[in-house]
Amino acid sequence: MSDHHDAHPVGTNFYTDQRGLKSWLFTLDHKRIGMMYLATTMLFFFVGGLMALLVRLELMTPGQTIVSAGTYNKLFTLHGAVMIFLFIIPVIPAALGNFLLPIMIGAKDVAFPRLNLASYYIFIGGAALALLSIVLGSADTGWTFYTPYSIRSATSVALITFSVFIMGFSSILTGLNFIVTIHKLRAPGMTFYKMPLFLWAIYATAIIQVLATPVIGITTVLLVIERTLGIGFFDPKLGGDPVLFQHFFWFYSHPAVYIMILPAMGIISEVIAVFSRKHIFGYKAIAYSSLAIALISFLVWGHHMFVSGQSELSSTLFSVLTMLVAIPTAIKVVNWTATMYKGSIDLKTPMLYALAFLFLFTIGGLTGLFLATLAVDVHLHDTYFVVAHFHYVMMGGTVMGLLAGLHYWWPKMTGRMYSEKWGCVSAVLIFLGFNVTFLSQFVLGRDGMPRRYYDYLPQYANLNMVSTFGSWMIGSGFLIMTIYLLGSLSRGAKAPTNPWGGKTLEWMTSSPPPTGNFETVPHVTEGPYEYGVK
């Protein structure tokens, strides 16, 4: 079973010289490609975060605060598009997944290293087009690019939607690479049931990437063709159907929510087991629930369209299917909680973010049930309740999971330890700031404040001010984090091989790992969470 490990021998024929900028730009080492993805996506997170702060600053008071209505529309469009397509979709699979997946299955690299590097440059090409669209006038449609307005808008909609089309290829190639790697390059003894749960989550994510991403690619190309050639796919004037665009868009974009959240769930499984010093409770249930979420995610897109005029039967079916997603999700939450029960819990920074994930994502999931209920959704649709729900799932879920994983694997990736004290300060500040920012938006939405609006009635002013103060707390937390993580690269203590006492394979090699990951091919004889077993 170990023959495949000799397919890419470590040496100058396969891996480039390990020094200098050129060695990074042309590397085929999955770890370096993962680090490049991490640096790039976190840069986009910084850009999207600055736009979020500007949006919140504008909404701090009624009327114009800092920008005009047109500029505001462009700001919140770019905030959404940058955060979704340039940060949150690629960051965990392409960055952490690339770095860790081969090591965690005992392989030297991914199945297709050159395709891996190509996917990164395709992503960079798409991202460059998205940034060019900002220079050439930006877009003002919202990140969903809804027709018919996106067909008629005088802004650079075609350029930013075409950039989404290009970045889709990167997502598909990464997903294909991961599926083949998991099937073909596992170390001797590494059965599917001995794989870390992070890899089950990445595997389920890769399936969604391969099957769903072509749909958004086709949709954005049709929009570009309609804008440039005047062919009526979505324009009712030309015999098109604007609601068809919503069906296409959400058929991809709802599964994409799980491209964002499933890898974060995988991280939480790793962190909770390690920092509770217990075997994960219900390993197979958590593993299969990832696949169940991936399957159900393709069947629920219509819950975004309850007020679009679709039939009552369609809406009822989508409502029921949406509530079904709660079952595999609840299985995970219950099993994580059971894992912590009577565990030896160590409240290090990764565990703080994992606990924040549990609290915030549970709120996000439960408020999703309100929006899945037809009668309630009609009242809450397109209000700030939806904005708050979405952020509790995406930031309270995905970003908290990412931060747990980033702090957990930072010593392994960089070979350096960060300041635990400042890690805890930052985690608490981000958690408190997040709740101040978005709990207030649930109330605003319940009271009827519509989303995407530049201005609002005076009765909403106080809670908007509270929400803006909260955004400053979040920004302060991330600023502290940036300082201590980057500072650790030069001043941090040298990381030991296994600082947290983990049982998965990445902790059995040096920090950072050598070029081929392991000196000899590992032979796996036990599961990844065998605490208390010699």
Image (spheres, rainbow, N blue to C red):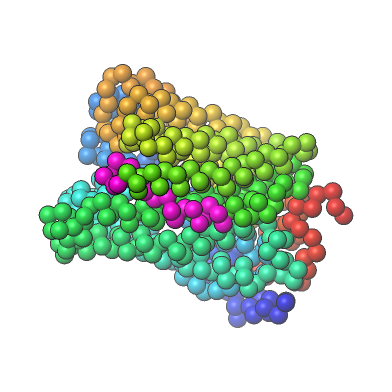
What is the residue that sits farthest to the left in this orientation? 237
Residue found 64% across the figure and 51% down from its top: 286
Q: Main secondary structure of the magenta part?
A: helix
Residue 398 relative to residue 415: left or right: left
Residue 523 relative to residue 443: left or right: right
Queried whether the magenta region covers residue 298, the answer comes back as yes
Which part of the image, by quadrant, shows the C terminus? bottom right
Residue found 30% across the figure and 37% down from its top: 452
Q: Quadrant of residue 232?
A: bottom left
Residue found 77% across the figure and 45% down from its top: 278
Measured along the vertical axis of the image, is residue 364 above or below residue 461? below
Measured from the top left, where is residue 54 in percent x and y?
35, 35
Residue 532 relative to residue 219: left or right: right
Measured from the top left, where is residue 64 in percent x and y?
25, 28
Measured along the vertical axis of the image, is residue 27 above or below residue 390? below
Q: Is residue 80 visible?
A: no
Residue 348 relative to residue 439: left or right: right
Q: Nearer the viewer, residue 386 or 351?
A: 386
Measured from the top left, where is residue 221 in percent x and y?
28, 63
Residue found 72% across the figure and 46% down from its top: 281
Measured from the top left, where is residue 250 in percent x and y?
36, 52
What is the residue that sits farthest to the right in this orientation? 534
Q: Which residues are magenta?
A: 291-311
